Image (cartoon, helix red, strand yellow):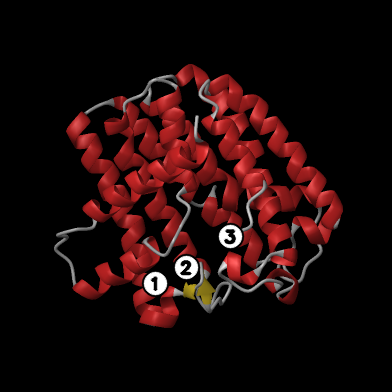
């Protein structure tokens, strides 16, 4: 299998469907423009790709899973818009472009994030109405929980309330499991759910947990040694803001070892889900990424 081509094909498929979903929406033009500004700012589409890849590996239907996967990307993008706001991480650039609030102002940026979150669930509910199938109820619940107060929002709360604090390993892991890991986990679990292969959920949960930890450790490493041009944002921001990270807790070399260790566990589990090798190659790609 040509991994790079398969990855690009999935990215293009997701981009095309996201464009379709946001076309001809009866809403003020400025909010659609702001939503699309961040949604099409050059994201790698990792979460929806995971969702589609797991579903297809388990012989699920692409038509069933595509809009569900796109809703996950909308939620991820909303979180980035809000994360960049002055009251949160106060970032000027994201993926090499000015952040949403720098272009549209704080108020529209907040509403653009809100718009993407709500439109994600509108998209999910449209699928549910069309299919009238319990699988889509289970998928929506999985996504809602992952993006809510016990998931992504809860992790962000731990993050912003511990700036400048020395935290232990358990709290650091809990923060990242929620802030980064839960939406990655939901992406994989939803792929299995839509494929109607509930018996694989234990494996998808373990795969995604290991992948999520490795993904976050690599993020923390890149904030220290990454190339700003490739990252599309400034490096050293975590240290400047006194944020707890895997690098501040373990150091650079130990963090690299941990990222590799968690990735290898994820690869072992990926092989139990997918015999095409795509998930295995995607896991390795994320370990060795530069942005």
Disc 1 target residue:
110
Q: What residue occupies the far top of the structure in this picture?
A: 199
Viewer-side label of 2, 3: 2
Q: CA distance from mark 2 to mark 3?
A: 10 Å
Whichever of callouts 2 and 1 sits on the residue coming sooner in the sequence is 2
User: Residue 72 in the image: x percent, y percent?
Assistant: 40, 47
Determine whether the residue tagged by mark 2 lies in a helix, strand or loop: helix
Label 1, secondary structure: give it. helix
Task: Tell me the number on the disc at residue 156.
Answer: 3
Question: Where is residue 108 drawn, in percent x and y?
Answer: 34, 76
| CA gap, disc 2 and disc 1 | 6 Å
Mark toward the start of the polypeptide (1 vs 3): 1
Task: Please state if 106 lies on the left or on the right of 166 as rendered.
Answer: left
- Asked whether, in this view, residue 5 is left or right of residue 107, the answer is right
Crowding at dot 3, Cα within 10 Å, few <14 / some 14-19 / many 20+, comes out as many
Please say if 136 is above or below 17: above
Q: Which residue is mark 2?
A: 82
Query: Depth check: 276 or 33 in front?
Result: 276
C-alpha separation, residue under disc 1 versus residue under disc 3:
16 Å
Kindly check if marks 2 and 1 are in contact, taking CB atoms under 8 A apart as contact.
Answer: yes
* Coordinates of residue 12 in the picture (x, y in percent): 35, 48
The quarter in which the C terminus is drawn is bottom right
Q: Position of residue 266 (x, y in %)?
A: 65, 32
């Amino acid at each position: 299998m040509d991994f790079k081509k398969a990855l690009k094909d999935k990215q293009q498929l997701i981009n095309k469907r996201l464009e379709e979903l946001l076309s001809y929406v009866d809403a003020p033009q400025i909010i659609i423009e702001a939503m699309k500004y961040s949604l099409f700012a050059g994201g790698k589409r990792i979460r929806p790709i995971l969702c589609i890849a797991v579903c297809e590996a388990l012989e699920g239907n692409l038509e069933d899973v595509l809009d569900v996967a796109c809703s996950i990307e909308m939620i991820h993008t909303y979180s980035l818009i809000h994360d960049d706001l002055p009251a949160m991480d106060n970032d000027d650039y994201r993926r090499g472009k000015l952040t949403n609030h720098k272009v549209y102002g704080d108020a529209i940026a907040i509403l653009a994030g809100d718009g993407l979150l709500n439109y994600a669930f509108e998209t999910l509910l449209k699928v549910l109405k069309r299919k009238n199938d319990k699988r889509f109820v289970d998928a929506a619940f999985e996504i809602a929980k992952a993006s809510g107060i016990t998931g992504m929002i809860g992790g962000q709360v731990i993050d912003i309330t511990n700036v400048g604090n020395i935290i232990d390993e358990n709290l650091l892991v809990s923060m990242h499991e929620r802030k980064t890991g839960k939406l990655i986990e939901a992406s994989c679990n939803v792929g299995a759910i839509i494929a109607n292969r509930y018996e694989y959920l234990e494996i998808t949960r373990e795969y995604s947990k290991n992948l999520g930890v490795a993904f976050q450790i690599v993020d923390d490493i890149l904030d220290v040694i990454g190339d700003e041009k490739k990252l599309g944002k400034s490096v050293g921001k975590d240290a400047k803001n006194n944020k707890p990270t895997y690098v501040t807790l373990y150091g650079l070399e130990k963090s690299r070892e941990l990222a590799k260790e968690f990735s290898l566990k994820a690869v072992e589990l990926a092989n139990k889900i997918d015999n095409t090798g795509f998930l295995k190659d995607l896991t390795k790609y994320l370990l060795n990424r530069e942005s």
